[in-house]
Image (cartoon, rainbow, N blue to C red):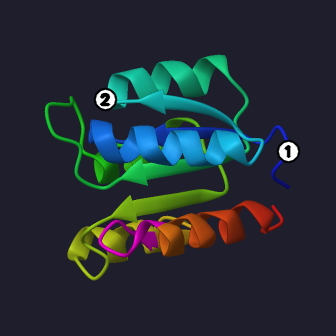
Amino acid sequence: MTDNTKILLVDDEEIATQFLKKELEKRGCIVDWAKTSQEAIQLIDANGHARYYFDLRLENSEMSGIELIEHLAKTKPISMMAVVTAYRHGEDALKAMKMGITAIIEKTIPSDIMINQIMGFLTQRI
């Protein structure tokens, strides 16, 4: 699953997310990007994404990434979620795993390895 796979990236880091968006689009994915929790909720309501990537620590947003995941778990359960974070072993990452996050992908690893991990996540079956 990569051609025309609809993905929602929820991350406030512009440079890294633009890079990730371009790389996924090169591989045939359709990528939406939300910089805040409110934008993410609107996009989730409007579009049928197959995969979701959340930054655990959204700055300048109504909710952090983990709070957004908690909100969605209560109001609109979605599957195939990954967390993209620089805090892989933190309390929020563990909390996210308990809420059904399928994968945790580190931001601090080389970009080619991160893209390979994301592509592996894309091929997982629902």
Query: What's the residue at 40%, 43% (across, down)?
Result: 17
What residue would you read off at disc 1? Answer: 3
Identified by mark 2, the residue type is Thr
Query: What's the residue at 24%, 72% (across, down)?
Result: 87
Quarter of the picture holding the N terminus: bottom right
Asked if the magenta segment contains residue 115, the reply would be no
Q: Earlier in the sequence, mark 2 or mark 1?
A: 1
Q: Nearer the viewer, residue 124 or 26?
A: 26
Q: Percent from the top left, x then y, of residue 68? A: 37, 42
Q: Percent from the top left, x then y, of residue 10? A: 42, 40
Quarter of the picture holding the C terminus: bottom right
Q: Where 98 falls versus 13 (above or below)? A: below
- The picture quadrant where one finds residue 8 is top right
Choose mark 2 or mark 1, whichever is in front. 1
Q: Tell me if 95 is positioned left or right of 100 in this view.
A: left
Identified by mark 1, the residue type is Asp
Q: CA distance from mark 2 to mark 1?
A: 26 Å
Q: Tell me if 112 is positioned left or right of 65 in this view.
A: right
**Residue 118, numbered label:** none
Task: Point out the residue furthest to the bottom here.
Answer: 89
What residue would you read off at disc 2? Answer: 36
Q: Percent from the top left, x then y, of residue 117? A: 59, 72
**Are there few (<14), some (14-19), or many (20+) residues within 10 Å of tag 1?**
few
Query: What's the residue at 50%, 51% (across, down)?
Result: 53
**Magenta part of the protein: which range?**
105-111
Q: Nearer the viewer, residue 93 or 74?
A: 93
Q: Nearer the viewer, residue 77 or 32?
A: 32
Task: Point out the residue furthest to the left here.
Answer: 60
- The picture quadrant where one finds residue 31 is top right
